[in-house]
Amino acid sequence: AAITLFLLIMAILMIPCSKLTDRWGRKRCFTAGLVLYGIGALVSAVSPGLGVLILGNSVLEGVGTALLIPPVYILTTLRFSDVTSRARAFGVISGLGGLGAAAGPLIGGLITTAIDWRAAFIFQAAVIALIVLLSRRITDPLPADPTSPFDGFGAVLSAVGMFFVVFGILQADSNPALMAALLAAGAAFLIWF
C-alpha cells in the first residue's frame, strides 16, 4: 500500500511540480524536494505503524520526488547547450537512475537483513543529506519568476489522468479489464489536459 501510494503521489504531482520550477526556481525545487524526501525517510524510520509509514514514505517522499526530478532534467538541459554533450549528460543520468533502480533494492535488502528495515530509511536520509550538501555548488542559470502563471485546472486534469494511468498499470497482474478501463480513463483526462 505504501509503495503504491508513493508511486501515485509522485505521478500525479510530476507535471504540476515541473511547472513550479519556473515560479520557484529549479535549484530551490530540487533542494526542497531533497529535504522533503529526507524528512520522509526519517519519519519512515521512526514510524510506529502503517499510518506514519505512509505519511513518511508515500506522502513526503512522493512529494519530494515529484519536486526534485523535474529540476534535474531542466538544469541538465540548460547546462549543456550542444546536442552531443546534452545527450551524454542524459545518458549518464539515465544510466545512474537504472543503476540505482537495480542496486537500491539490493542495498536496502542487505541493510534490512543485516541491521533493520528502519536502518534502510536512515541510510536514505544520510545519502540525501550528502546530496543536499554537494548540491550547494549548483547554480540556476535562469532566475525564478514568481509571476509565471500556474494552471490549477490543468494541474488537476494532469493529476487525475496520471492517477488513472499509474493505478491502471498497477492493476495489470490482478485485473486486466480494470486496467484497461483505468488506462482509458487516464488517457481521456490527459487528452483533456
Image (tube, rainbow, N blue to C red):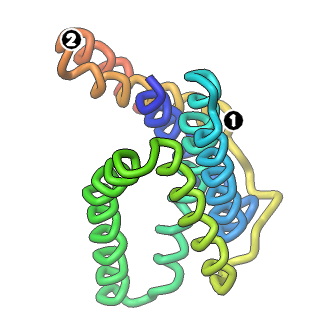
Distance (Cα) linking label 2 and label 1: 33 Å
Whether residues under marks 2 and 1 lie with C-beta atoms below 8 angstroms apart, the answer is no
Residue 193 visible, this angle: no
Q: Please tell me which residue is depicted at 25% across the width and 17% down the height of the picture.
A: 179
Residue 114 falls left or right of residue 172: right
* Label 1 crowd bin: few (<14), some (14–19), many (20+), radius 10 Å: few
Give coordinates of residue 84: x percent, y percent. 29, 88
Give coordinates of residue 10: x percent, y percent. 50, 41
Q: Please tell me which residue is depicted at 28% across the width and 27% down the height of the picture.
A: 169
In depth, the one of 185 and 168 nearer the eye is: 168
- The N terminus lies in which quarter of the figure? top left
Residue 100 falls left or right of residue 122: left
Which residue is denoted by mark 2 in the rendering? 175
Give coordinates of residue 41: x percent, y percent. 59, 47
Q: Residue furthest right?
A: 147
Q: Is residue 18 above or below residue 75?
A: above
| Front label number (2 vs 1) | 2
Q: Please tell me which residue is depicted at 54% across the width and 34% down the height of the picture.
A: 58
Say which label, 2 or 1, has the lower sequence index. 1
In depth, the one of 160 and 122 nearer the eye is: 122
Give coordinates of residue 85: x percent, y percent. 34, 89
Q: How many marks?
A: 2
Q: Is residue 130 above or below residue 29?
A: below
Which residue is denoted by mark 1 in the rendering? 152
Q: Of the numbered discs in the image, which one, if any, rests on residue 22? A: none
Residue 87 visible, this angle: yes
Residue 61 picture quarter: top right
Residue type of the residue flagged with mark 1: Gly
Residue 82 picture quarter: bottom left
In depth, the one of 60 and 17 nearer the eye is: 60
Q: Is residue 140 above or below residue 173?
A: below
